[in-house]
Amino acid sequence: MSEFIHVDALLQVVVAGALVGAGLPALFALGVRLLAPAQGATLAVEGAPSGTDASPAATRPTGLRLTAAALCFGTVLAACAVGIWFLASGGH
Amino acid sequence: MEYVTETILLALVVVTALAFDFTNGFHDTGNAMATSIATRALKPKTAVALSAVLNLVGAFLSLAVAATIAKGIVDANVITLEVVLAGLVGGITWNLLTWLLGIPSSSSHALIGGIVGSVLAAVGTSGVLWTGVLSKVMIPALLAPVIAIGVAALGTFLVARITKDLPQDTTSRGFRWGQIGSASLVSLAHGTNDAQKSMGIILLALIAGGAVPSDSGVPFWVVLACAFFMALGTYLGGWRVIRTLGKGLVEIDSRQGMAAETSSAAVILLSSHFGFSLSTTHVATGSILGSGVGMPGAKVRWGVAGKMLAAWGLTLPAAGLVGALCFWIQDVIGGVGGTVAVFTILLGVSTAIWVASRRKPVDASNVNDEWDGEGETAVVDAAESFTAVAVEVTAEAEATIAATTAEDAARSATTSTTAAPTAPAREGVPA
């Protein structure tokens, strides 16, 4: 059977594929969520800055959220860079 | 005379390889851009233009895998210019037919099928490494969509959970960017991997024809030509395939699109990293399906997906049949006449398919129209087109054979051989 299916390579593709291929979209989604204007009690646990009661939709994300979001998007961008580097280096 | 024959053969192989390169770009635009077009993250024309530029850039990124054509699948010693030409015609024919039907199918599998077919016709079963066919083509074709469906479904599920309580309009702007980015990576990877296949074929042909030394690298004009034709094909956009991928399989939103394209890029790059290369088309299609599976409440049209799977199963034998037929015609007629005949058949088939496609054109203006009940009409269209094509090909083959036989008898110059078979193709167009 292993003559026809390279089980090792296949398993590596499945595991790494799931980690990267599903992990990056999840990170991206997390980033989008962190940057989204705080709405209601669910997202305002970190404490919205004062003086925003008038327009809660326009609430700016706090520094902590911004940093976390930057980390998420940064990881995604770094992964893209690795992908391009991989292509340029011959794809092996 | 021998020298002239070789030169004409070489020139026709190069032109045919560039034509394959073109259909490859044309056919595979949807792999990267269908989701971005369907979710309107990009305007259709902008999407294909972006993809074309990235394919162009991608083609210049690396030359590492050029010169490995059907390696480990057919015996390298039996590959001649004639075999390559017949194989290319098989690949192009299958690419165009599946495009007509709006079915995404792997361009590299079509090429491999064509070459396996022409090798079978040339030297019989001994020229084909069946273990390689199974382990490098058939089994990956079955596994690729399964892996991609799994990865994309998981990704989509996670994304949907994380963004569950966010309003759609806040998320879609962010996700559109993610979608464009990931689709761009898929385009770049396509340009790098697939343009190199055509470069490899042309390099092999040049070496076999004695135009460059056997240890030559890929000449710059070959890189440039392959990059250009792939980008041109991409820009013209296989709208029929884009429509099926973007609208036919799953109704997709930008979160699904982002998850699907990221899954495609990750699986394509990782699979080539681990030496288990999977077809871009199979992975991209699987990912889009997966984004429907993982999205709570999304509807997946499994009927459309089933038709695709059937087409993937047919790719190798169908392209192989055309490849074998072309090699046989080439061999029976022999010499320049045979090569020109095969090339003429290619022109005829391409024209017939193009004419058939104009009956119900799909382009940038209607690519996103609602999808309803196109399955049945597609089958009827298919039957009609197949008949039209078959009639055309038979007529041309007969005409060419007749013309060439007459030529041989008269022993006249090659110029009239080239002129004679082209005439019936022109007449065939309005039919």
Image: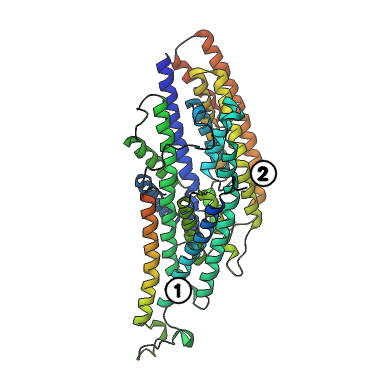
Question: How far separated are the C-alphas under marks 1 and 2?
Answer: 47 Å
Could you classify mark 1 by the number of other residues whose Cα lies within 10 Å: few (under 14), some (14-19), or many (20 or more)?
Answer: many
Q: Which residue is mark 1?
A: A30
Closer to us: B37 or B310: B310
Residue A30: x %, y % from top left: 45, 73
- The relative height of residue B290 versus residue A46 in the rendered view (above or below) is above
User: Given this view, does label 1 or label 2 mark the residue nearer the observer?
Assistant: 1
Q: Secondary structure at mark 1?
A: helix
Residue drawn at x 53%, y 29% is B86
Q: Is residue B188 left or right of residue B78?
A: left
- The relative height of residue B182 versus residue B90 in the rendered view (above or below) is below
Residue drawn at x 54%, y 28% is B345
| Chain letter for the residue marked with disc 2 in the picture | B
Closer to us: B167 or B75: B75
Q: Which residue is mark 2?
A: B380
Question: Which dot marks residue B250?
Answer: none
Residue drawn at x 47%, y 86% is A40
Extreme residue in the top direction: B410
